[in-house]
Image: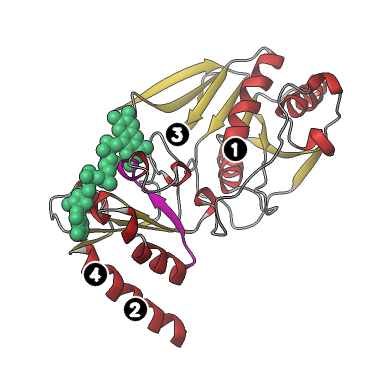
Amino acid sequence: MKIWVVAERSKDGELRRVSLEAAAKAAELGQTEVLEAHGSGAARTSTTAFANALAERAKDAPPELILIGATPAGRDLGARLAAKLGRPYLSECADIRVDGGKLVATRAMYAGKVRASVSVPLPAVATVRAGIAAAADSEPALVPVDVGWDAGLEFVRFEETKSSGTRVPLGEARVVVSAGRGLKGPENWKIVEELADVLGAAIGASRAVTDAGWRPNEEQVGQTGKTVTPDLYIALGISGAIQHLAGMSGSKVIVAVNKDPDADLLKIADYAVVADLFEFVPAFTEELRKVMKQA
Ligand code: FAD
């Protein structure tokens, strides 16, 4: 089966992890081409222009399946491309398989309380969430697709993009230190930042924290936030509600620190630390600093 994966790069030029994971999944399912759209000026960021270029390419030798990472741009592109090609579209798939000429996908519904199995006939377009497969260590061979521009395409123009900081972006990070309401207030985030600095980690948060305005929304991990699949996820003072687990349970190693031994996150953690985080975290950070210095 012929599959296209449309790859996406982060602002610093790295292929996004979710694109690498989509490519690994595609390789399990069939014969894969990983495409990268190239345009200049406005065509560099226009999903309308990308969709046009990819639909044009599909005319000659259409693939049976097109996979795209479920990033904001990827979801936008997937919907446009499916509409242009007149194909069914499944968004935000947590798992996919091909069965009897159909694409069968698992998708979260009702804020993660239900996992639905849905199917559409092939050929189809789908966006896939982080964690769909283990990303290969090496980059796949990329096939460039030239994207042209026409002033009539300018429905949305990117005026400016702002970065919220210098840390590694949450969705790309190998290590994430995430914190919840157990931190008691935004003034206590220094201990989270110190631990993240020692580990070169991104910072995440539970929704209780972002809803309270203690941390920016883009740090929220979970069903209605970001899905992360780092090598190491450290959760500090997070209870482990199902909506939070939906965004991080694909992490390779999970460390949870909670003073309540019955907290749900401790039950799925590889390393469950029952402790007061205000005592544990500074001491742990100090020990890590010593170990890192010796290394
Ligand atoms: P709490 O549940 O209040 O847990 C705080 C934890 O800190 C407790 O386990 C406590 O024992 C521990 N603690 C307290 N003090 C200390 C201390 N000194 N030392 C150590 N531990 C301590 N949530 C998300 O995170 N992401 C989502 O995307 C998301 N989407 C949602 C979508 C919907 C539709 C709904 C209804 C809810 C969603 N939620 C989401 C909210 C979710 O249900 C929980 O309310 C939320 O995750 C709880 O955040 P928390 O664990 O920080 O807070």
Residue 189: name its quadrant: bottom left
Task: Decide: few, some or many residues near mark 4? Use Cα within 10 Å; few <14, some 14-19, many ≥20.
Answer: some
Please name the residue shown 28% across and 75% down the image. Answer: 283
Residue 280: image tag: 4
Coloration mode: secondary structure
Q: Are marks 2 and 1 in contact (CB under 8 Å)?
A: no
Instruction: Tell me the SS state at disc 1.
Output: helix
Q: Is residue 17 left or right of residue 47?
A: left
Nearer-N-terminus badge (1/3): 1
Please identify, in this view, whether the residue under mark 3 or under mark 2 is nearer the observer: 2
Query: Where does label 1 land, which residue?
Result: 26
Nearer-N-terminus badge (2/4): 4
Instruction: Tell me the SS state at disc 2.
Output: helix
Residue type highlighted by circle 4? Phe
Query: On screen, 65 above or below 222?
Result: above
Query: Where does label 2 land, which residue?
Result: 286
Residue 155: name its quadrant: top right
Q: Is residue 229 left or right of residue 124?
A: left
Query: On screen, 206 above or below 278?
Result: above
Query: Where does label 3 land, which residue?
Result: 94
Q: Nearer the viewer, residue 204 or 53?
A: 204
